[in-house]
Amino acid sequence: MSTYQRSVRVAAPLEAVWEFHSTEEGLKALTPDWMGMTVTSVKGPDGEPNPPVLEAGSVLEITVQPFAFGPAQQWTSEITARERTDGSAYFTDVMTEGPFTEWEHTHRFYADGDETVITDTIEYTLPLGPVSEFAGRLAFVGFEPMFLYRHRQTKHRLES
């Protein structure tokens, strides 16, 4: 399994950053247009459609078609953990169906005074059999532009 990690400091309080990242709208706002993402379904842990907050047990079904090239890929992700404590918060989403053999994305948020440090950690396995480990090390080429965009958008939308 390979790991990608990236952090950013946002000049906004933890509560605002946490709330923004806890919704379907936040996901849409942080996904670059070139990913060709469409959210096809969001269900809360009780099966409620379009819940206001993505709690643990929420399931998102999306399609992605990067650069409008090739067939759209189906992606199903479940929020498997979500916790907020004094000064920190995190949630984890796990791909249950999609283009990776394994995908677990943990979003961590730490208060630092009036600012927040966000750390995204992705543990993943590419579907390439015996070369997955080697090829996984090169996947940062695709992840880095995506997370640079996400972090710039977070700063743009939340910093005063």
Image: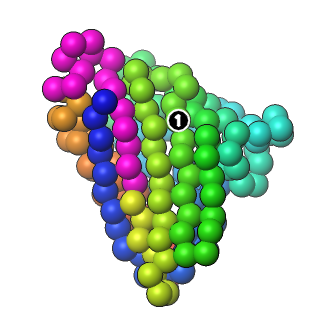
Q: Residue furthest top?
A: 129
Q: Residue at x 48, y 23 (%)?
A: 98
Along the line of sight, the residue nearer the viewer: 142 or 91: 91
Mark 1 secondary-structure assignment = strand
Give x and y (percent) for residue 149. Answer: 35, 57
Is 123 one of the magenta-colored residues?
yes
Quadrant in the rendering for residue 128: top left
The image quarter containing residue 122 is: top left
- At x 61%, y 40%, the residue is 80
Visible residue check, residue 154: no
Q: Which residues are magenta?
A: 120-134
Residue 139 x %, y %: 24, 35
Question: Can residue 133 be found in the magenta stretch?
Answer: yes
Q: Position of residue 22 (x, y in %)?
A: 62, 57
Q: Is residue 21 above or below residue 38?
A: below
Q: In the rendered image, which residue does mark 1 sit on? A: 94
Q: Is residue 11 visible?
A: yes
Q: Residue at x 70, y 39 (%)?
A: 57
* Color theme of the render: rainbow
Amino acid found under the numbered disc labelled 1: Val
The spot of residue 38 in percent (x, y) is 56, 36
As drawn, 117 above or below 90: below
- How packed is label 1: few (under 14 Cα within 10 Å), some, or many (20 or more)? many
Dividing the picture into quadrants, the one containing residue 17 is bottom right
Whether residue 134 sits left or right of residue 103 in the image: it is left
Quarter of the image where the N terminus is located: top left
